[in-house]
Amino acid sequence: MTTTAPRLGTALARLLILAAALLGTLLAGAAPASAHAALTGSDPKDGSVVATAPKEVNLTFSEQVAMSADSIRVLDPAGRRADTGEIRDLCSGSVVRYGVELRAGLPDGTYTVAWQTVSADSHPIAGAFTFSIGAPSATSVALPDREPGGGLVGALYGIARYLSYAGFAVLVGGGAFVLVCWPRGAGVRPVQQTVVRAWLVLTGATLAMLLLRNPYTGSGELSGAFDLAGLKSVLETKTGAALTSRLLLLGAAALFVAVLFGSYTRRTDPKEKKDLVFGLGIGGTVVATGIAGTWALAEHASTGIQPGVAMPVDILHLLAVAAWLGGLTVLLVALHRAPSVERAAVERFSKVAFTSVAVLAATGLYQSWRQVGSWSALTGTRYGQLLLVKIGLMGVLVGIAWISRRWTQRLADLPSAEKAENAENSENAEDAENAEDAENAEDAENAATKATEGAEEAKGAREAEDPEDGEGPENGEDGQDGEGSGAEEGSGAAPAVDPERAAQLARQRAAVATARRKRERDADPERSGLRRSVLTEAAVAVVLLVVTTVLTATEPGRTEEEAGRSTSASGPAAVPDRPVDVRLPFDTGGVDGKGVVRLSLDPGRTGANGLHIYVERPDGKPLDVPEVKVALTLEAKDVGPLPVAPDRIQAGHWSASGVQIPMPGEWRIQVTVRTSDIDQTTIDKNVKIG
């Protein structure tokens, strides 16, 4: 059988269109992608030292969060609650700020602020920082090192999330494939099983997420999944409402599947089938859109910039993914389990997949701009790096899809060979059937021979037991009857009576039928090539979906960069709990020109500080020098140099009091040491001052 190669120009044009679509799909935060809130500021600031106890602690976030009574906790140095537990909503316009009041009469020391909440995109976030009243002190507060949404519960929740995406894609894409591309597939059992199992997976994953939601956003303990009070609180949240709505819509989806694989397959009137297809198409579209909307309304699309545009775009993105990958899965099943799938059905799906990629291009470009926002975020954040991994996978997937389209075009370019191939398949089927009949006839003959031999052995045994009776005509007649009975059994009745023999014949017939089907498939190189390329495409799609699921739990690049800029603007975080000590070797080049400068800045934070300078010889003994000068510079803020003129206390010891550090940051301390009238040097070191 000859084949016609695809036209190169058309194939290249389609490849260029797919490559353009790839620019959007590659950068699209997978469906769906997360947009975690981040802590952008606090009052008091992280690591700051205040003279008197503040009345409250305020936290500012990058986007809206869900607060509970224990979302913000302030703990004193002994680990006791220092707040009243009353969360105040201080939001104003686009500023998202919450506060908690502190108790009166708090003593000096270091206080720990621990917070945990749920961002508007349904992901838990948490953190902690410290501030000091009067002066830093030791603290006995030990915060858990478990990240929110981690551990066993987080892993199970992530698996359920992945299965829900996969189930949705196969359920929606499989139903669309049958209705649009291959109506006859509604009566094919492997296709039915695939779509029904996808419904079961999506339903089970949704139930698991609903039960795991409480420990996922709270304690992190698996036992919390069976806490009825926690489940009730989950149902009152936006995510709980979305999961509940998804379960209700899955009930409607079950009705759709039952009608598609039940009433529709039994209809024989073309007009009735056409009307039923129209109804199933409208109803299925509404249900699929509603299920996709449960992700868009509860996760990233409903928060951040332009939610009114992002939510419908996200729904379209999800539906396009389902039409492509879900239909691909059902096509793979059909090619392997139902080799009689029509070429026209494969060609129609190729057009559907191409349209889906175009939709992914449009929605993906918007998603990438919304979630990443800049090239620096694409390469400098974890979200962007994962997105680059997805770029490679999508490139491979689109390349394989192009190969599948080439095989599909070859199938479409062979209408003249259809009759010849069908004749060949019919001849193969006839040969296989003749072989099967011959094999059945041989089996029947063997069975007859075996039955006859059995009858003769039984007769010989009776004659041995009673020889005299065996000579009588009556017994002889019985013997003849016995032989006749055995002959009748051997003539074909035995296989119908013997269950073991019947099962053996059934297995032989099934093996012959399987061999016939395999010969038919192997005799069609175009279909075999398409089957291999679709299998590879599906395997890459599975890996791609894994990366997509990881992306849903990763903070997007835009949010991460904004949080980083806010943190930098608020100043450095850490404040040492002891003076800043600096050791600087020097060499002026003259006599007694080598030594070490030890500098101590106490308490080493903003405000007034005491400065002590010790000049020592290499052996550690004091070195009396004519002059020591100090300058402080904050280059990030263009502050300084601020000169400091210390006073000589004794040989090798210089001191200054009231050294003012106006603001926190990375300060450069310069020390100038003069060991003679002409020998001096300047040494410096950067230190962090809070």
Image: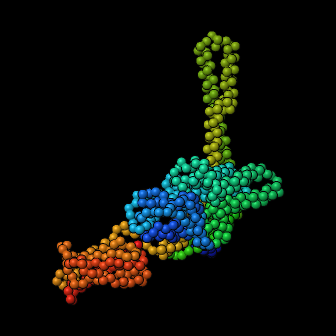
Residue 43 coordinates in the image, percent (x, y): 50, 70
Residue 494 coordinates in the image, percent (x, y): 66, 30
Residue 151 coordinates in the image, percent (x, y): 49, 54
Query: What residue appears at the point 31 percent right and 72 percent down from the top-left corner?
Result: 581
Residue 156 coordinates in the image, percent (x, y): 54, 53
Q: Name the side, left or right, on which 64 lies relative to 345.
A: left
Q: Residue furthest front?
A: 105
The quadrant in which the N terminus is found is: bottom right
In the rendered view, tell whether residue 452 sits above or below residue 107: above
In the rendered view, tell whether residue 146 sits above or below residue 447: below
Q: Name the side, left or right, on which 2 lies relative to 109.
A: right
Query: What residue appears at the point 61 percent right and 12 percent down from the top-left corner?
Result: 466
User: Who is closer to the viewer here, 499 or 101?
Assistant: 101
Q: Is residue 282 visible?
A: yes
User: Who is closer to the viewer here, 351 or 466?
Assistant: 351
Q: Quadrant of residue 602?
A: bottom left
Q: Is residue 597 visible?
A: no
Query: What residue appears at the point 67 percent right and 62 percent down from the top-left corner?
Result: 293
User: Who is closer to the viewer here, 118 or 662?
Assistant: 662
Q: Residue furthest left?
A: 591
In the rendered view, tell whether residue 232 sits above or below residue 64: above
Query: What residue appears at the point 48 percent right and 69 percent down from the top-left corner?
Result: 44
The quadrant in which the C terminus is found is: bottom left
In the rendered view, tell whether residue 564 sits above or below residue 265: below
Q: Name the side, left or right, on which 226 lies relative to 268.
A: left
Q: Residue furthest top?
A: 468
User: Who is closer to the viewer here, 337 or 27?
Assistant: 27
